[in-house]
Image (tube, rainbow, N blue to C red):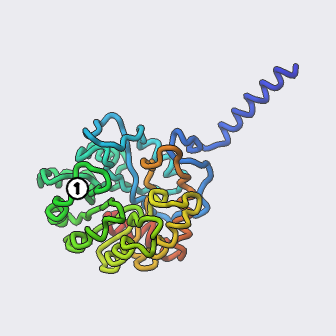
Amino acid sequence: MPNRKRREFLHYAGAAMTACALPRWASAEETWSSGTELPSFKLPEGAIDCHMHIYDDRFPVAPGTTLRPPNATVEQYRLVQKRLGVRRNVVVTPSTYGTDNRCTLDALKRFGTNARGVAVVDSAVSDDELRNLHSGGIRAIRFNLSYPGATTLDMLAPLAARISAFGWHIELVVQGARLPELERHLVALPCPLVIDHIAHVPQPGGLSSDAFRTAARLVEKGRTWITLSGPYVDSRVGAPAYDDIAPVARALIGMAPERMLWGTDWPHPTEKSSKPDDAHLLDLFASWIGRPDWQQLVFVSNPSKLYGFS
């Protein structure tokens, strides 16, 4: 075989072998996740990803929204599930859709009994609409006070009173620096509270910040849960170890492992230039949790109880 043809043959043969050898989740373009390796940590049976989003341009974005990622579909997320070894998940309506929960409800229908959802509603929502959301798999409502949009602070108490009858909870995403001013409102809620992304405790500051002290008080009162997700959002140090976030996460875990949750935050909508490695993040969270009995709580028992998984 002439040298040129031999080189071409080896090139295409090598490409074909690579395509066969790599799992389909190896393409970050397909999964919105970097890396190709499986996690070192094996999730316990029944683990639940408590915070992820679906984006689908079949559904219109809300006017005035600023976070508008490309499509991140049910099929793409299933590849990430396969890579991580997780079969159950909680779909959270992102700010992109305002109070239109059709994208989330469509995803819940396609995921089936292995999924629950978090909706966004405002004060105009009717009791019939809340009942329909519950039938569709919704188990909480989200207040996103970080991005201007559908929900405002004055809606918090009235809506919390209404959803408590369904056994739902409030999921809050807000800058950690605002937690002290919100504390009195959050303590008074008649339903459980979940604070996303490690309570958004700001850096630098971390353990010495008023935000952390407020989060700690809320956790210690017994009705506040924390989602271990998105360490990149508030880290100044960054990947791979997020060394500034680690002490905050470990401290919160140590206070109440029975009220910690875990979420991928897939497709990582705030990370526009490059996506994190979901397998590495899982390994990192597992190392912060540490004890096997606490890992069972965080990954399985806690979310099963909160979101009503059997």
The residue that appears at 38% across and 49% down in the rendered structure is 53
Residue type at mark 1?
His
Image height of 113 relative to 188, above or below:
above
125 or 218, which lies in front? 218
Measured from the top left, where is residue 170 in percent x and y? Answer: 26, 63
Residue that numbered label 1 is attached to: 134
Measured from the top left, where is residue 306 in percent x and y? Answer: 32, 67
The residue that appears at 28% across and 43% down in the rendered structure is 97
Q: Could you say whether the residue bearing mark 1 is in a helix, strand or loop?
A: helix
Image height of 207 relative to 264, above or below:
below
Image quarter of residue 6:
top right
Image height of 47 relative to 289, above or below:
above
Q: Residue furthest front?
A: 204
The residue that appears at 88% across and 19% down in the rendered structure is 2
247 or 10, which lies in front? 247
The residue that appears at 36% across and 38% down in the rendered structure is 56
